[in-house]
Image (cartoon, grey):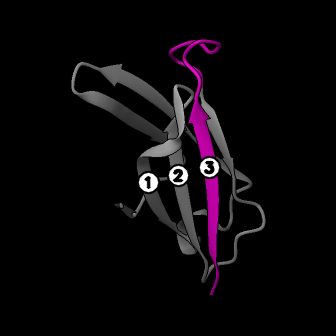
Amino acid sequence: MAIVTRRRTLRPSTRQPDSRYRVKTHNLGLNDTLIIEIDHEGNPDVNIAVFECSGVEVGSRNSIHFTAEHTPDGWIYHWTGVQPTRTL
């Protein structure tokens, strides 16, 4: 049982608002846990969101995807292929 971390940086200055961000999952085992850390290009040292996914949910996939929508209250994430098991 391993904990695998992937980091994605939101880059609204160079990407369309509906661009999908890919998270590769092909090396994830069924008993592993995937942690997805999301930061912003304006301050890449600070996570703006952290999600956890179960290896059972994503281990059989090559990748999962999300889009990020900026609202006045912050960011909303729309997942394709899986819903994270929890937000950290």
Tell me the crowding category of disc 2: few under 14, some 14 to 19, or many 20 or more residues within 10 angstroms, Cα based. some
Asked whether the residues under the numbered discs 2 and 1 touch, taking CB atoms below 8 Å apart as contact, a structural biologist would say yes
Three-letter amino acid code of the residue under disc 2? Glu
Q: Residue furthest right?
A: 27
Q: CA distance from mark 3 to mark 2?
A: 5 Å
Q: Secondary structure at mark 1?
A: strand
Residue 5: image tag? none
Q: Nearer the viewer, residue 35 or 41?
A: 41
Three-letter amino acid code of the residue under disc 3? Arg
Q: CA distance from mark 2 to mark 1?
A: 5 Å
Residue 71 sits in which quadrant?
top left
**Residue located at (49% from left, 53% from top):** 82
Could you tell me residue 56's position as x and y percent? 56, 74
Tell me the crowding category of disc 3: few under 14, some 14 to 19, or many 20 or more residues within 10 angstroms, Cα based. few
Q: Nearer the viewer, residue 47 or 33?
A: 47
Could you tell me residue 38's position as x and y percent? 51, 44
Segment colored magenta: 1-19
Could you tell me residue 60's position as x and y percent? 68, 65
Residue, disc 1: 50
Tell me the crowding category of disc 1: few under 14, some 14 to 19, or many 20 or more residues within 10 angstroms, Cα based. some
Q: CA distance from mark 3 to mark 1?
A: 9 Å
Residue, disc 2: 37
Residue, disc 3: 7
How many marks the image carries: the answer is 3
**Residue located at (39% from left, 64% from top):** 85
Residue 5 sits in which quadrant?
bottom right
- First in residue order: circle 3 vs circle 2: 3
Asked whether the residues under the numbered discs 3 and 2 touch, taking CB atoms below 8 Å apart as contact, a structural biologist would say yes
- First in residue order: circle 2 vs circle 1: 2
**Residue located at (51% from left, 15% from top):** 17
